Amino acid sequence: MFNEGNASMNGLLGRKGANLAEMVNLKLPVPQGFTITTNACRRFYEEGKIIHPAIEQEILEALAALEHLTGKRFGHRENPLLVSVRSGSSISMPGMMDTILNLGLNDETVAFLVQNEANARFAYDSYRRFIQMFGSIVLDVDGNLFEEELERMKLNSGVELDSELNANHLLTLITTYKEIIVRETGEPFPQNPHTQLMMAIGAVFGSWYNQRAMIYRRIQKIPEHLGTAVTVQEMVFGNLGSTSGTGIAFTRHPSTGNNELFGEFILNAQGEDIVAGIRTPHPLSILKESMPDTFEQFRKAAHTLEQHYHDVQDIEFTVEDTRLYLLQTRAAKRTAAATIKIAVDMANEGLITREQAIMRIDPASLMPLMQYKIDPHADVHVIGYGMNASSGAATGIIVFDAEEAERQHRTGHSVILVRQETTPEDIHGMVASAGVLTTRGGVTSHAAVVARDLGIPSVVGCESFKVNLAERQLHTDSIVLQEGDVVTICGSTGRIIHGEVPLVPPTFTEEFCTLLAWANEYKTLAVYGSVNTPQEARFARKMGAEGVGLCRTELMFMDPVRLPIVARMMLAHSKRERRKALHKLIPLQKQDFLGIFRAMAGCEVTIRLIDPPLHEFLPNPATLALEIERARVAGDEDLLEEKEALQKRIDILHELNPSFGHRGCRIGITYPEVYEIQTRAIAEAALELKAEGITVYPRIIVPLVSHSREMKVVRENVVETLEQVFSVYLDRIDILVGAFVELPRACITADKMVEYADFLTFGTNDLTQSTYGFSRDDAEGRYLAYYLDNNILPENPFSVLDVDGVGELIKIGIERGRKTKPDIKIGVCGEHTSEKQSVRFLQEIGLDFISCLPHRVPSARIAAAQAAILKTRKPK
Ligand code: PEP
Ligand code: MG
């Protein structure tokens, strides 16, 4: 029973059940009921999808207790008890599992509801909805069969809305629905409420494994074994007339985080109408105006809940003839911006501590805040407005269904999914989309809730637009868009804009800056940026990077001017030819070094000597073949000769597995002039800035070393070059030389490696490739997806650090490195450095710094602060 539970029993009762129990304990107005536990759900599956008789017996006992509490009797024609049967796992999965309302209605009990003429419509509508829900969810009848009959009835009766159907229409519909059930299942619609109840409970348990729930769990990494609880709760009716209604409210704004009660309400409607986006709701003020006392009671209850849970609540409620009932409360899903504002505000209000504020932020969820926004000065062609449901701007081609969204996304398109309203079945399409646009529904509709959860921009309820699915068109009175046309949506203002528009970099709120400043007070890991240009270095520093952990010099060459020169250098036959190409490149690179050092004045800047996987720099063989053919046809002998020579050279240099090919320090050892000239550029840039009075701390790092002798050779060459530069400039500067540890052998022999390395940086991208023997480019598109879908690997090891394998190698590297050089500085570069679990592990094993892309620096700072907080909180 609800009064036997509390909020901490979330695992057993599911979040909904546990919170209903807690609300009962808080003496808030909650319809009575009971919860069937997640243990019972697991048992249901163990028994082969059967409710064990002992559990059935307990359910019947609970039902008897509920009858006693409510004074109503299940299946009784005088004052019958009607219930809702709802799912609820310990981690909320909005709309992913099934719900059945109005259970307990049958041909007899419906008569009780028909007390007068006005109620007849309500009674038959409730019964009609129940048969429809029960038929499609429990009896597995195709839901469209009911929908078609409903549409036909509306057409024949000359009405447009469901609510315009009268009692007689609904009565006829009930008969038709029952016939559908006999026809489709061979059995009549069950009249016995006990049978209805047990079947409904089984179906709700069964919905744990429906397709949308499984997809949602996979995306959200919710474990299979949790199972769902089922709550059985006395029905209250929001569709009893103009003094009834149903609403959803947030104790603070879920999009902005502003401290104001925010929500939506529909008069004379049942709970599912809002969530399903079937009717566009009104703001909460309609409740305040029409039933001020009820509103005031709700406002107080909402405040009580927020104070009690120390977090923003998302509350579902129903008003039955001016009486308020709370049906659900849960921590509200919110945008990243709102998460930050709420956490900082609550810490400032004293509701939570600063530590709790930091711990509430999922570092990955900050990414939308790093999104660019629509340039406010841009000339845009606004073609419509909707509600601003999830912030950020997105540009893409419009598509009209989830499958097409997935298909277009796979071929590299940015996609805006356009639907009348989304349903839980659309989840895979939403995941593949850059933005979601709906023509119906409000800011608490499915589309809005899921978009916020996924961190993608969304505009909902754009009622001036109509979707024409048959023609694959979206149109207003003034414009017709075809599938594939480009639009931009602004989830912050609700604008729909024709075509692509200029975007501007993000700006940060006061609360965001406060939170990041708090993070710095806790974190002990230094957070560096991985940057390749002066512009990126400036951005990284603005984001709070404390230096540059990695500058990938080969990426500095990835522009149309430099790339052909690099290709020439790589393809050179002789040292002379190579030097010639290098002499063209290095002045350009030196300018970049000057810019980066300047942007990072006073901080360490680690520059990696070139590490070019050959295939990324050479002309595409197919394109080259085409060019040769063209030269031949055109009779251009010189060009033909040049291109053929190039082709021959590429053939010679061709590698079967370039990821582990002639790259990294192997280039610097076989072609020492490459590293020599780069070292010269680094040292010259540093000394020139020193002469200007700017403090620089340049570091050089040697990529892809596997043997300490590689490190020895490169180091000696680097030091010799540095000395030459120093003697020319008549000045010196400290430049440490470190080893980039990205191969297992380098980890295992770190004790020898550090004899020639002043610092160590682990490159977890290549270290993951080389530990698993996965070639990332191939793996992610092929078998790795299968591995993840089939739970062969729990996570993508390129996103979440593989602690047992790769992590163990890092631990060995640290331990052995520090055996020889106890104070050596050690860090990690690689994509794992802003992911919370990975950062936590890196903190535990005693690293000094992490380095990540500039726009991930804020996430890394939060992750590092969380790791430090968790470390000190750990029981001894
Ligand atoms: C790494 O391998 O982890 C790394 C940072 O280098 P890159 O990603 O450039 O190979
Ligand atoms: Mg690497």
Image: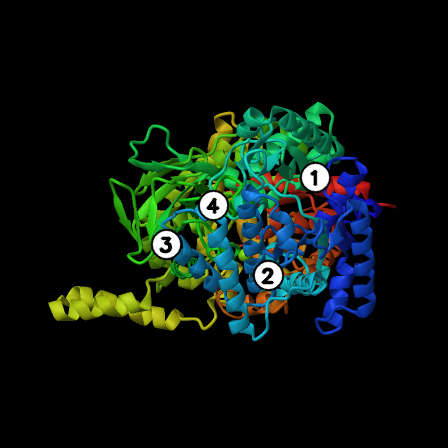
Residue at numbered disc 3? 155
Q: CA distance from mark 3 to mark 2?
A: 24 Å
Amino acid marked by disc 2:
Phe
The answer to which of marks 3 and 2 sits earlier in the sequence is: 2
Residue at numbered disc 4? 163
Amino acid marked by disc 4:
Ser
- Observer-nearest of 306 and 704: 306
Q: Give the residue furthest to the left.
A: 635
Residue at numbered disc 2? 134
Marks 2, 4: nearer the viewer: 4
Q: Position of residue 454 (x, y in %)?
A: 54, 48
- Observer-nearest of 217 and 701: 217
Mark 4 near ligand 1 (CB under 8 Å)? no
Label 1: which secondary element: helix
The answer to which of marks 2 and 1 sits earlier in the sequence is: 2
Label 2: which secondary element: helix
Q: Position of residue 59 (x, y in %)?
A: 79, 59
Q: CA distance from mark 4 to mark 3?
A: 13 Å
Q: Which mark is residue 359?
A: 1
Q: CA distance from mark 2 to mark 4?
A: 20 Å
Label 3: which secondary element: helix
